[in-house]
Image: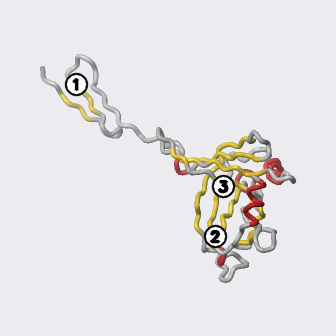
Amino acid sequence: MQADLIKHKLKEHLGGSVNLLTIDAVALSGKAGELFQIVNHFGETGAGVVFAANTYKPHPYKVGNIKKQAKSSKTSIKINIADNDDYSFSRYIEEMGGALEGAQIYEYQVYERFLDAGSTPNAQAYILKFKHEINYIEQAADKEEIIIHTIDPLSKQIEVPSVSFSAGDPNSTQSYINVFPAVTREIANTK
């Protein structure tokens, strides 16, 4: 994955848009400022980009396609994040207690002119590509990247109230139909 970032830098032109990835573990740690913010671009100076007064450091990552499960309405994404030579991402996980399950992860798409160093900076000019919750994390086979599996918090299992029907007592002249749980209706059978 590091080689992909080097290739990207060689052909980089920030005239279009950049994708900014943020992992927000504030809810897990309870401390403000527990954000891991990265970008696939080196930026004009090689130090990344600044958007809305937040610095996004260059760090290779790749977002997979959004997957929707057929049996349920769950959507998920697999994100590969390189663990650089300085192991900055592994150190971030350790600082957060060794686990990021439940942390928020989201990606913005921002046009270059709206970055803080752009021609018309605007902190409100972004496209939210996704905002998910980290489901679990695994180490890739090549040990140079970490794979994050996410789940859309709006597509978690939702329990829907069920409608029940009861035929009443067997061999009785009374039948009960309970279409709405709060209302009981009796129907008398004449034999």
Give the crowd class for mark 2: few <14, some 14-19, many >=20 residues within 10 Å: some
Residue drawn 81% across and 69% down?
Answer: 46
Q: Amino acid at mark 2?
A: Ser
* Structural distance between the alpha carbons of marks 2 and 1: 70 Å
Q: Quadrant of the C terminus?
A: top left
Where is residue 47 drawn, in percent x and y? 81, 68
Q: Quadrant of residue 184?
A: top left
Q: Position of residue 45 (x, y in %)?
A: 81, 73
| 111 horizontally vs 81: left or right | left
Q: Is residue 20 left or right of residue 91?
A: left
Q: Residue at x 86, y 52 (%)?
A: 85
* Residue under label 2: 17
Number of numbered discs overlaid on the protein picture: 3
Local SS, label 2? strand
Furthest-bottom residue in this view: 119
Query: Residue 104's mark?
Result: none
- Judged by depth in the image, the label closer to the viewer, 3 or 1, is 3
Callout 2–callout 1 Cβ contact below 8 Å = no
| 33 vs 117, nearest the viewer | 117
Q: Residues within 10 Å of mark 3 (few under 14, many from 20)?
A: many
Find disc 3 in the rendering and name its residue.
Answer: 105
Nearer-N-terminus badge (2/3)? 2
Checking the image for residue 174, the label placed there is 1
First in sequence: mark 3 vs mark 1: 3
Q: Along the line of sight, which residue is nearer the eye, 127 or 170?
A: 127
Q: CA distance from mark 3 to mark 1?
A: 57 Å
Give the vertical position of 107 relative to 173 (above or below): below
- Amino acid found under the numbered disc labelled 1: Gln
Q: SS of the residue at dot 3?
A: strand
Residue 83 horizontal side relative to residue 157, left or right: right
Q: Quadrant of residue 43?
A: bottom right
The disc, 2 or 1, on the residue closer to the chain's N-terminal end is 2
